[in-house]
Amino acid sequence: MKTLLRTVVVVTLFATPLRAQQKVNIQRAVTPNVSVRLNGALSSVRVIAWERDSVSITGSIGAGSRLDGGPMGGTAAVGGMKFYVEAADEAGSRSNKIELRVPRNARVWIKALSADIDVAGVAGGLDLNIVGGSIKVTGKPRELIIESMDGSVQFNGVADYARIKTATGDINLQAHGDDYSVTTVSGNITVTPQTDWAYQRARFESVTGAITFAGDIARGGDVRFDSHSGAIELRLPYRVNAEFDFVTITGAIENNLTNHRPAVGREGRGMELGVSSGMGGARVQVRSFKGNVKLTPR
């Protein structure tokens, strides 16, 4: 890693509420795996990883807002930084827009109310939390934790460990990894295919939201789907090597991938389908109460 700065440069430091919109420009030398926390009244946060041992915080905050935190003094590289943004009202909050540049292996924690968060290239840990707005992550974070109430979530990349949860927000994944848990109440979960990418161990859950899975499953993988009343559709290659175990309580099962037909459930209601495709090896389990389940070729 190159060391860009060994001194602190703060063009504008907000110690008291401001009467007009002000620019933010904070530069600080840090360790390669620095932990950075940012929370408060934010409308937009863009996080970019770079090949420098420094943190750069730029952007602007609105009238009546203030930015506190640090450390800002000293010249030695620090291993942790924490900042908080306050706003006098909602209008001021909408003007608070920050761009954060961090070392590639940094750990970043961001919490906001209604904000659009866009993260690119971070290989360390990410912990992102919003109520409304949106979250978009691109890259290969070591671990990814996202919680959103109403905001949508999009992840394009690879994560060894991922925990993604929403209430009403949609979740879109062009991703893969070893250990995934993806949960929503009424949002829709969509997994799109990526070349040579496969899920090793994953669980997708919804209450009323639909789940559409068109990803690949690693040999020996274990992927599970659970829904109360949301539809579940698995779009898989004809020659996928997997053992399927589908059960619904009142929902229907439609199998267009193999010649096997679902049977009536053991208690005389719902449906069951147990089938092996290809050489087997992976396990795919689906459990649904009222939602319909469809297995279709991709």
Image (cartoon, rainbow, N blue to C red):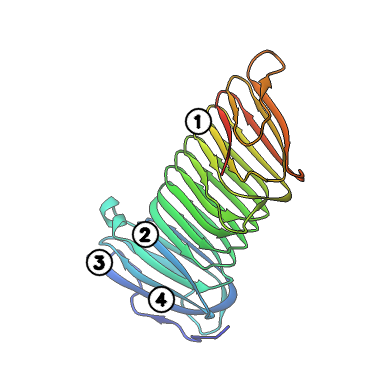
The N terminus sits in image quarter: bottom right
- Dot 3, crowdedness within 10 Å: few (<14), some or many (≥20)? some
The residues bearing labels 1 and 4 have C-alpha atoms spaced at a distance of 45 Å
Amino acid at circle 3 = Gln
**In this view, 27 is above or below 168:** below
Q: Secondary structure at mark 3?
A: loop
The residues bearing labels 2 and 3 have C-alpha atoms spaced at a distance of 15 Å
- Any mark on residue 44, and which? 2
Q: Secondary structure at mark 1?
A: loop
Residue sitting at 51 percent across and 48 percent down? 147
The residues bearing labels 1 and 2 have C-alpha atoms spaced at a distance of 30 Å
Q: Which residue is mark 3?
A: 21
The mark nearer the N terminus, 2 or 3, is 3
The mark nearer the N terminus, 4 or 2, is 4
- Dot 2, crowdedness within 10 Å: few (<14), some or many (≥20)? many
- Any mark on residue 26, and which? 4
- Dot 1, crowdedness within 10 Å: few (<14), some or many (≥20)? some
Marks 4 and 2: which is nearer the front? 2
Q: Which residue is mark 1?
A: 208
The residues bearing labels 3 and 1 have C-alpha atoms spaced at a distance of 43 Å
Residue sitting at 62 percent across and 46 percent down? 237
Residue sitting at 28 percent across and 57 percent down? 92
Front one among 143 and 38: 143
The residues bearing labels 4 and 2 have C-alpha atoms spaced at a distance of 17 Å
| Residue contact between numbered discs 3 and 4, judged by CB atoms under 8 Å | no
Marks 2 and 3: which is nearer the front? 2
Residue 157 shows up from this direction: yes
